[in-house]
Image: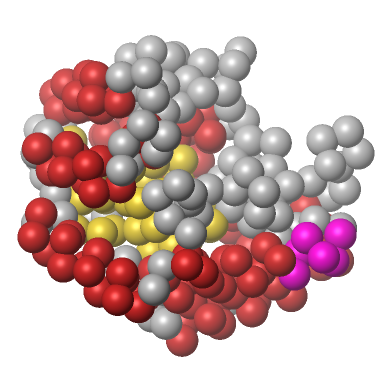
Amino acid sequence: MGDFLKLGTVQYSYLWDYSLEDALKEIKALGFRYIELMTTPPHFWPPSFTKEQRKDFRKLMDHLELELVAINPTFLDINMASPNPGIRDESVRQIMEQITLAHDLGAKIIVVMLGKRHPLLAPPVETVWKRFAREGVLRCTEHAERNKVIFGVENGPSLFIDRAEFMLFVLKEVKSPWMKIVFDVANAFMVESVVPALDLVRDHLVHVHLSDTDTVKWTHSPIGMGGIDFAPIAEKLREMHFSGVSILETTHAENPKWGIVSSVEKLAPLGWRM
């Protein structure tokens, strides 16, 4: 099969019914080493997460022998591409707080979706970038560089940056060695062919999200519950000599453990290992 691909998970499915510590303990019990944290309430609210709590969290991660690869604020409300300057300013402020949190917790990457365009009257990507998103993204990237945290631009359907070509557009505009690409397989599947898109961003790829979906309804289902063929994706990542971590980003709150375990069982024969 060749080199193994590193596999980790998020704690997102545990958000509502588990404490953060209990979620981490279960993830450890499942055999994981690598983790990405959704730094969103009720598990996290950076402004109220004190210096001492941040130190205690790092001690907990060391005790559990978990490696924090990335943090992900989620982006239901954050929109650095909004035409509304108040929303933009607040979004930039929160992303900068999250970058500081990533530094304090020892995470290498912050995952960032740059924002949304109006779904009924969407201006071109270049227009949104120049008029709304550029200034804030540059400020956040500079803050990431100061904190030695990688600013990972993620693709998302119906958002400002939904395709591989637009992620590359932003990277070429920013020209920072601290800006890289986070490729979400399920998000890409909604708008483009996954393997060619992966190939397009190969030189900038730092992190991968794995979940399943079909093209009728966008989901982040356990692997095998959608229409994505993960075999050619694994083959492409190995051919690229991808050394980062692929993170299970399933949202299966009714049975988080099953959603994760069943996904691992589907991915292991393809070369992913915890």
Pick whichever, 137 or 59, lies toward us.
59
Q: Residue drawn 61% across and 13% down?
A: 216
Q: Is residue 128 above or below residue 137?
A: above
Foreground residue among 162 and 32: 32
Quick one: quadrant of the C terminus?
top left
Residue 141 in which image quadrant: bottom right
Q: Residue furthest right?
A: 121
Residue 166, percent from left and from top: 65, 52
Residue at image position (42%, 82%) is 147
Q: Quadrant of residue 80?
A: bottom right
- Horizontal and vertical percent position of residue 16: 42, 34
Is residue 172 placed above or below 43 in the rendered structure?
below
Q: Position of residue 56 (x, y in %)?
A: 22, 69
Magenta stretch: dominant SS?
helix
- The N terminus lies in quadrant: top left
Residue 237 in the figure: left or right of residue 41: left
87 is within the stretch colored magenta: yes
Relative to 17, residue 198 above or below: below
Instruction: Find the residue positioned furthest to the bottom.
Output: 146
Q: Within the image, what quadrant is residue 127 found in?
A: bottom right
Give x and y (percent) for residue 112. Answer: 54, 57
The stretch of residues the image draws in magenta is 84-89
